[in-house]
Image: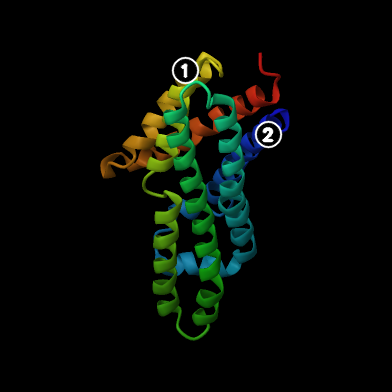
């Protein structure tokens, strides 16, 4: 049990770091959020494909894998107190992890054919990348954080009932989970950024808790 808890703690730290690094790269280094023209997106893709591929691996593929490890640690810690909530929450976490892995793999799979097509038909390459990007965003929760929100909410409710995690952490998890859920409403989709920042804090706090000896 001790080993699983420590691995879960380090996994939680990794996910917080991945959130932060991804935000910095896409918002400030690549400035991807401000680019709406498909042709400009493909031009950026060609100029920065190495960085984009690496970022997708670190922030989606590996993130999704270590998320599964975190869910195993949380299920082990909380299972005795509220098994239905924990099981449901962990299953959603596993689904979310798999969806994130798929999102990163789809995005990276689209880069090579788009770059190749760009040499002969830039307009067609832009259309092709739009398709890959849409599928990847759908899998990764680009417009809705329902899976991550529900997972965080259910785990926090179970932890609050069992007192296996600090109350403050659980309250934060409740708030973050609710924000994630409401991003499903199109008018509130912009709250995905709030969810990301809130969950990043939750991951850091959770990491410290899991690395400490359970009282």
Q: Nearer the viewer, residue 212 or 3?
A: 3
Relative to 177, say whether 113 is above or below. below
Residue lying at 39% horizontally and 73% vertically, measured from the top left = 127
Q: Nearer the viewer, residue 142 or 147?
A: 147
Residue lying at 52% horizontally and 47% vertically, measured from the top left = 97
Relative to 35, say whether 40 is above or below. below
Q: Quadrant of residue 136?
A: bottom left
Most extreme residue toward the bottom, as rendered?
120
Q: Quadrant of residue 181?
A: top left
Mark closer to the chain start, 1 or 2: 2
Label 2: few (<14), some (14–19) or many (≥20) C-alpha neighbours in 10 Å: some
Residue lying at 41% horizontally and 25% vertically, measured from the top left = 175
Q: Secondary structure at mark 2?
A: helix
The spot of residue 43 in percent (x, y) is 51, 69
Q: Is residue 44 left or right of residue 145?
A: right
The spot of residue 161 in percent (x, y) is 45, 17
The spot of residue 215 in percent (x, y) is 66, 13
Q: Nearer the viewer, residue 33 or 83?
A: 83
Residue on which disc 2 sits = 4
Q: Is residue 26 left or right of residue 209?
A: left
The image's mark for residue 152 is none
The spot of residue 165 in percent (x, y) is 56, 19
Measure the alpha-carbon separation of dots 1 and 2. Answer: 21 Å
Q: Is residue 70 left or right of residue 140?
A: right
Label 1: few (<14), some (14–19) or many (≥20) C-alpha neighbours in 10 Å: many
The image's mark for residue 160 is 1
For the N terminus, give its image quadrant. Answer: top right
Question: Is label 1 or label 2 in front?
Answer: 2
């Amino acid at each position: 049990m001790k080993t699983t808890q420590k691995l879960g703690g380090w996994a939680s730290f990794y996910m917080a770091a991945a959130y932060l690094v991804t935000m910095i790269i896409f918002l400030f280094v690549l400035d991807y959020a401000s680019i709406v023209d498909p042709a400009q997106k493909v031009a950026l893709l060609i100029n920065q494909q190495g960085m984009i591929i690496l970022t997708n691996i670190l922030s989606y593929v590996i993130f999704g894998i270590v998320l599964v490890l975190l869910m195993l640690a949380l299920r082990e810690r909380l299972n005795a107190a509220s098994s239905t909530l924990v099981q449901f929450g962990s299953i959603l976490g596993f689904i979310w992890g798999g969806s994130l892995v798929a999102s990163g793999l789809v995005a990276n799979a689209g880069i090579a054919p788009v770059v190749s097509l760009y040499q002969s038909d830039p307009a067609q390459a832009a259309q092709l990348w739009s398709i890959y990007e849409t599928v990847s965003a759908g899998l990764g929760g680009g417009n809705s954080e329902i899976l991550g929100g529900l997972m965080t909410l259910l785990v926090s409710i179970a932890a609050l009932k069992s007192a296996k995690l600090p109350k403050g952490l659980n309250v934060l998890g409740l708030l973050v989970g609710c924000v994630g859920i409401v991003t499903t409403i199109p008018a509130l989709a912009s709250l995905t950024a709030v969810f990301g920042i809130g969950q990043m804090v939750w991951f850091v706090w959770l990491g410290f808790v899991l690395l400490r000896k359970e009282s």
